[in-house]
Image (spheres, rainbow, N blue to C red):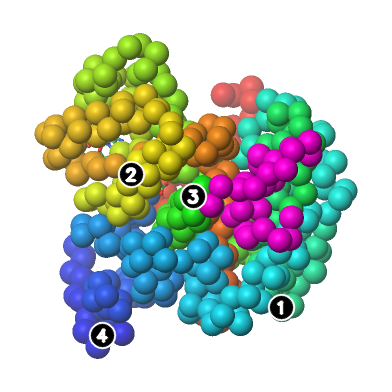
Amino acid sequence: MSGKTATLNLPDGKAVELPVIVGSEQEPSVDIRSLRDATGYVTLDSGYMNTGAVQSAITYLDGEKGILRYRGYPIEELAEHSTFVETSYLLINGKLPSRTELDAFSKQLTYHSLIHEDMRHFFEGYPPTSHPMAVLSSMVTSMSAYYPDCLDRSAPMDLHITRLLSKVRTIAGFSYKKSIGQPVMYPRNALSFCANFLHMMFAVPAEPYEPDPVLVKALNQLLILHADHEQNCSTSTVRMVGSSGANVYAAVAAGILALWGPLHGGANQAVIEMLEEIQKTGGDGHAFINDVKNKKNNSRLMGFGHRVYKSYDPRAKILKKMTDEVLAHLGIKDPLLDIAKALEEVALHDDYFIEKKLYPNVDFYSGILYRAMGIPTDMFTVMFAIGRLPGWIAHWKEMVTDPKSKIARPRQIYTGETTRSYLPIEQR
Ligand code: CMC
């Protein structure tokens, strides 16, 4: 509370004093929770364009200035110096771990990396054409059947959190192996979190496999960049589902499904498909940009624009540099990267994009990087899900440990018919 109030004058002569709440970064807000009881009015904000649904201490984002911080730490510093495991600990527990805490957390993740052997057979039931996001969400829901103590919300949740973080990576690796008809590769305890994922994806039984340290570092950075983004569509979904008392696996599975859409995490796959289409038609992107501006077939420049960022997404800046470095290390020349850079150059100087404040977002370059690492296009959103997992868990934990949290239940403005009498079918 700031002690200040805002006065809202309503058309029927009523006036109401509403408390002003100021966040730790001085973001002012008007607390309208008492509005309906006091006046009968509700607020309308479709798509939550301007609604603070929660007070949260996890992530700070300033879309005008291009600032992103997890628990106060700038994303640039975390991407440069941290690991995904350490950043996960930070998000979930609110502080950077000591050496002992980090070792214990890493050890837990290592020892919970296997999925129940029975669950391995689930993969056989899916058709080879299954989208890996469909498989991932169902597998995560199934985990609640294998660990039914998750249904008791008063029981400790640490083990479920560890299982989720570790096993989602294994599920992703196994589902890829299944989709290409190779035997699954079990995790190796001697490997770090990200190295182990690369091992499960790319090792084959016939040959020794040592993950490339440059790719391990790049994967750590990619996952850190995706690890949280405050109240986005999937995180809000996790909170919404969790607010009903549903277990953590159910809430996270719902988040995975929300992430799948092309306007959210599915955009990384859509970017590559867009770049491939431009390449196929032999263009340099100018014609495509014109189609986007003319809203031809409702096309959008995928990987551009963001609800909150109205300047360059800081994650995209880091990713662009990382993409250049990894491709140079691997000796790959990807023509899609040239098309992406050309599109960016055109868009950043075009009035349509300038006026609407549309800049590259995290998904614009991530797909090119995943491609260079050998990850197939339809798994890009799964990679986003692995990265976003600690954020979803941190928000779920923040919600369930807040004694004041309530079931999410928005209001509506009803626009349908007013009361009318039922007519028997013969009289209609
Ligand atoms: N290309 C062309 N025009 C665009 C784009 C785009 N990528 N994004 C927004 N616009 C236009 C849109 O047509 C609208 O124009 P008008 O005012 O003439 O109707 C205006 O900009 C505002 O768009 P909006 O859809 O009302 O804005 P929003 O805040 O609801 O949408 C967005 C945000 C991310 C869904 C949108 O920018 C978009 O569809 N981008 C492409 C998909 C994408 O890259 N998504 C990944 C987002 S970052 C990862 C994540 O966190 O999910």
Residue at image mark 3: 214
The amino acid marked with disc number 1 is Pro
Check disc 4 and report the residue beneath it. Answer: 2
Mark 2 residue type: Lys
C-alpha gap between disc 3 and disc 4: 48 Å
The answer to whether one can see residue 74 in this image is yes
Q: Residue furthest right?
A: 118
Q: Secondary structure under badge 1?
A: loop
For label 3, the crowd category at 10 Å Cα-Cα, with few meaning under 14, some 14 to 19 and many 20 or more, is few
Q: Secondary structure at mark 3?
A: helix
Contact between marks 3 and 1 (CB within 8 A): the answer is no
Mark toward the viewer: 1 or 4: 1
Q: Which residues are magenta?
A: 188-213
Which percent across, then down, holds residue 266? 48, 38
Ligand 1 - quadrant of the structure image: top left
CB under 8 Å between discs 3 and 4: no
Amino acid type, mark 4 = Ser
Q: What residue is shown with label 1?
A: 156
Q: Specify the amino acid type for callout 3.
A: Val
Query: In the rendered structure, which disc, 1 or 2, sits on the residue that comes first in sequence?
Result: 1
Residue 409 sits inside the magenta stretch:
no
Up-down: is 330 above or below 80? above
Residue at the (20%, 33%) spot, across then down: 345
Q: Is mark 2 within 8 Å of ligand 1?
A: no
Q: Secondary structure at mark 2?
A: helix
Would residue 286 appear left or right of 306 to someone viewing this image? left
